[in-house]
């Protein structure tokens, strides 16, 4: 049996599609350059192989959420620009500065602390001003920026060469709300230019911004931040870049048997069989990232045929109906089951799971548990 077949539950990631998606994003976002966002273990796929793929493909920098993620990448990529998009705590500043990480500045007090630590270590720390234009999470409020930024620029040992913002709902495109946020951000950039201050790195577009807000690819914007786009998933239906899913999620059929009419299936008997039905048990449950929302609603693919989920998804196993098969063609225990992916004309997408769960693809990706073996092909 191949190594792929030995994995009980596996996430297969195709390296070449990762690279090809990156190339398409680079072309679509031009003239802006592309930062690769690798937070949360590359959105659950496995950060080390993904980072290597993107480094080879030409990503100009990596972006992460916190210090631990940044230090992990720094070990493998000693010379790569690595930016922490989120907050850095006081107790993390020493390591952040020592490892030449790019830090966001959400306010004067944070800048003062970064400056003091940089002076102490006799280092120059690259920093990007984080501007809050509508997210309401962290950053210098746009209306205060023209007053606060000049104060920060007077601090020693800071290379404040960047400025960035984040959309709360870029999947909606350049509607009135998002256009106003772009203009709010550019007013800060223009206001600082009027004071003789320019920035080498100006970025606002996340993956949905790349797909839906083309204004953010053009000057004075210099960079975009590609995250889930790299994996071929979306928060909308605009795939104008022709990106492809890079992964499939697969498991195996554990057993099957004929169950009589009137029998309950699964916890709380949320399904009572209306007729005699052959039920299969597949390896994988909510501990592995299968949403409970698939219960009595989702579907999997076995031998190219859709098989509906029956009963409630449990922690380790899920029941599905084999009504799509005749008695002489029943799949046997050990048969491969596609949870997310394509077999012939049958396809189950991450977006389908997200819609059933009432969430977005990011949530699905980041939910794949530690029992799911990541395999790079």
Image: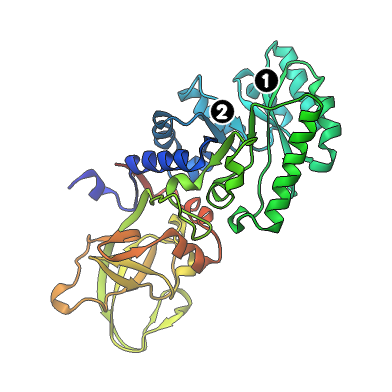
For the residue pair 182 and 156, the one nearer the viewer reads as 182
Residue 374 left/right relative to 115: left
- State whether residue 103 is above or below residue 230: above
Under circle 2, the secondary element is: strand
| Image quarter hosting the C terminus | top left
- State whether residue 240 is above or below residue 139: below
Under circle 1, the secondary element is: strand
| Residue 54, horizontal then vertical, whole percent | 43, 34
For the residue pair 125 and 142, the one nearer the viewer reads as 142
Residue 84 left/right relative to 142: left
| Residue 258, horizontal then vertical, whole percent | 25, 80
- State whether residue 50 is above or below residue 312: above
**Which label number is shown at residue 125?**
1
Q: Is tag 1's residue or tag 2's residue first in the polypeptide sequence?
A: 2
Q: Is residue 189 visible?
A: yes
Q: Residues within 10 Å of mark 1 (few under 14, many from 20)?
A: many
Q: Residues within 10 Å of mark 2 (few under 14, many from 20)?
A: many
| Residue 266, horizontal then vertical, whole percent | 41, 74
Q: Is residue 106 visible?
A: no
* Residue pictured at 44% horizontal, 49% vertical: 241
* Residue pictured at 22% horizontal, 65% vertical: 303
* Residue pictured at 66% horizontal, 45% vertical: 166
| Residue 335, horizontal then vertical, whole percent | 22, 61
Residue receiving disc 2: 82
**Which label number is shown at residue 348?**
none
Coloration mode? rainbow
Residue 41 left/right relative to 19: right
């Amino acid at each position: 049996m191949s190594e792929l077949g030995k994995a009980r539950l596996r996430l297969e990631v195709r390296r070449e599609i990762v690279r090809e998606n990156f190339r398409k994003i680079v072309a679509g976002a031009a003239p802006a350059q592309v930062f690769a966002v690798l937070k949360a273990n590359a959105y659950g796929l496995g950060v080390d192989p993904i980072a290597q793929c993107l480094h080879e493909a030409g990503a100009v920098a990596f972006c992460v959420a916190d210090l631990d993620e940044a230090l992990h990448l720094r070990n493998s990529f000693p010379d790569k620009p690595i930016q922490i998009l989120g907050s850095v705590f006081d107790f993390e500043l020493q390591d952040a500065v020592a490892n030449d990480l790019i830090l966001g500045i959400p306010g004067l007090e944070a800048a003062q602390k970064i400056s003091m630590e940089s002076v102490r270590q006799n280092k120059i720390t690259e920093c990007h001003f984080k501007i809050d234009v509508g997210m309401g999470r962290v950053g210098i409020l746009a209306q205060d920026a023209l007053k606060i930024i000049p104060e920060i620029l007077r601090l020693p040992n800071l290379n404040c060469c960047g400025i960035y913002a984040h959309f709360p709902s870029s999947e909606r495109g350049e509607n009135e709300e998002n256009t106003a946020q772009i203009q709010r951000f550019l007013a800060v950039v223009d206001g600082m230019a009027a004071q003789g201050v320019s920035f080498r790195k100006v970025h606002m577009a996340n993956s949905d911004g790349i797909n839906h807000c083309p204004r953010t690819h053009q000057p004075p914007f210099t960079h975009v931040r590609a995250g889930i786009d790299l994996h071929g998933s979306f928060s909308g239906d605009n795939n104008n870049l022709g990106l492809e899913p890079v992964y499939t999620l697969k498991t195996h059929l554990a057993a099957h048997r004929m169950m009589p009419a009137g029998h309950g299936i699964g916890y709380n008997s949320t399904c009572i069989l209306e007729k005699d039905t052959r039920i299969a048990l597949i390896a994988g449950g909510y501990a592995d990232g299968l949403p409970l929302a698939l219960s009595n609603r989702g579907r999997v693919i076995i031998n190219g045929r859709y098989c509906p989920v029956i009963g409630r998804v449990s922690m380790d196993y899920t029941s599905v109906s084999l009504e799509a098969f005749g008695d002489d063609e029943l799949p046997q225990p050990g048969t491969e089951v596609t949870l997310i992916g394509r077999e012939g004309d049958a396809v189950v997408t991450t977006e389908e799971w997200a819609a059933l769960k009432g969430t977005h693809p990011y949530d699905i990706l980041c939910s794949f548990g530690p029992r799911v073996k990541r395999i790079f092909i």
